[in-house]
Amino acid sequence: MHELGVVFYIIRDVKEVAEQNQVEHVSSVVMDIGEVSTVVPHLLTDCWRWAADKEPLLKDCELKINTIEAVSYCGDCQQEYETVKFGKDCPFCNSHNTWLQRGNEVEINSIVV
């Protein structure tokens, strides 16, 4: 389960930002998690609860997750399409000349104090 490792990185970054801004308590952290990022949201929130409550700065801090839809782009027909639904093949022209534009994110969106 790599979600625990991700949580440790989130906590490290939140603590760093809190220290820089002289914040004593964080009430929530909002994450942007892409559909194809390999991070499982419910596992991330379970790991968060366990780890965050061990940090006074994050005691009872809520982890909120925005799911970012995976969208691919076709280099041949210049169309965007849903990656999860269609995979590597463009549903408009059947080209394999496609790449992921978004949906692989694992980013802190905001920290609420």
Image: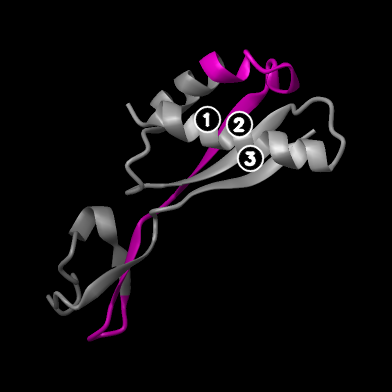
Q: Quadrant of residue 17?
A: top right
* Label 3 close to label 2 by CB (< 8 Å): yes
Q: Which residue occupies the foreground of this view, 50 or 20?
A: 20
Q: Residue at x 19, y 60 (%)?
A: 86
Q: Which amino acid, mark 1? A: Phe
Q: What residue is disc 1 on?
A: 8
Q: What residue is disc 3 on?
A: 13
The span shown in magenta is 50-79
Q: Residue at x 62, y 13 (%)?
A: 54
Q: What residue is disc 2 on?
A: 11
* Label 2 close to label 1 by CB (< 8 Å): yes
Task: For label 1, count other residues whose C-alpha is less than 10 Å away and answer few (under 14), some (14-19) or many (20+).
Answer: some
27 in relation to 18, above or below: above
Q: Secondary structure at mark 2?
A: helix
Q: Which amino acid, mark 2? A: Ile
Q: Secondary structure at mark 3?
A: helix
Left or right: residue 87 compared with residue 112: left
The label shown at residue 39 is none
